[in-house]
Image: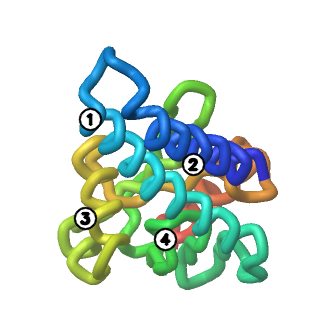
């Protein structure tokens, strides 16, 4: 809910920038309006997605015998089979931790995905060396509990 309210706040700031552009003389009005429109589009789309996810009844994450079905973010909605996972790492941006899932052939995995999800995965791949990550911040779960659960399942699959 807080991220949705944050998106709404940034949409309002973007609208203010657009309306304020002609009344300031520090930057060119075109630049200020451009920044406002970019913010309006980006945060508007983020807000719509967050609003949709607030009422989404699908489970955010399913961990079963097949693998991990991730529905927790915009880049998710796919199954990560256990035999494709080679390891787990922890990443962190500011105070938000996330699980990075290292795959056998990340490029092949990304080639099976289309559209904006593929673009988002490529961004994650370039930054962290893997296209898949899971954050507990979008789930009703503690980070350490989630990491330990996935790691335990991965270890049991490796032992077989």
Mark closer to the chain start, 2 or 1: 2
Query: Which of pointers 3 and 4 indicates the residue nearer the eye?
Result: 4
Snapshot quadrant of residue 18: top left
The residue sitting at the front extreme is: 23
Mark closer to the chain start, 2 or 4: 2
The residue drawn where x is 72% and y is 82% is 58
The residue beneath circle 3 is 106
SS type, badge 4: loop
Mark closer to the chain start, 3 or 1: 1
SS type, badge 1: helix
Q: How much space separates mark 2 and mark 1, taking CA atoms?
A: 17 Å
| Vertical placement of residue 130 versus 28, above or below | below
Mark closer to the chain start, 3 or 4: 4
Query: Which of pointers 2 and 1 indicates the residue nearer the eye?
Result: 1
Marks 4 & 1, CB-CB < 8 Å contact: no
The residue drawn where x is 80% and y is 57% is 140
The residue beneath circle 4 is 76
Q: How much space separates mark 3 and mark 4, taking CA atoms?
A: 15 Å
Mark closer to the chain start, 3 or 2: 2
């Amino acid at each position: 809910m807080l991220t949705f309210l944050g998106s709404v706040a940034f949409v309002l700031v973007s609208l203010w920038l657009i309306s304020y552009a002609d009344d300031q003389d520090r930057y060119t009005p075109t630049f200020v309006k451009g920044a406002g429109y970019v913010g309006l589009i980006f945060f508007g789309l983020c807000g719509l997605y967050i609003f949709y996810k607030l009422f989404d009844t699908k489970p955010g994450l399913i961990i079963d015998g097949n693998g991990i079905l991730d529905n927790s973010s915009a880049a998710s909605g796919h199954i990560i089979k256990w035999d494709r996972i080679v390891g787990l790492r922890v990443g962190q941006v500011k105070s938000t931790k996330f699980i990075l899932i290292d795959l056998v052939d990340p490029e092949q995995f990304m080639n099976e995905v289309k559209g904006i999800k593929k673009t988002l995965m490529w961004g994650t791949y370039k930054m962290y060396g893997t296209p898949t990550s899971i954050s507990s911040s979008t789930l009703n779960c503690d980070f350490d509990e989630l990491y330990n659960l996935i790691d335990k399942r991965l270890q049991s699959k490796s032992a077989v």
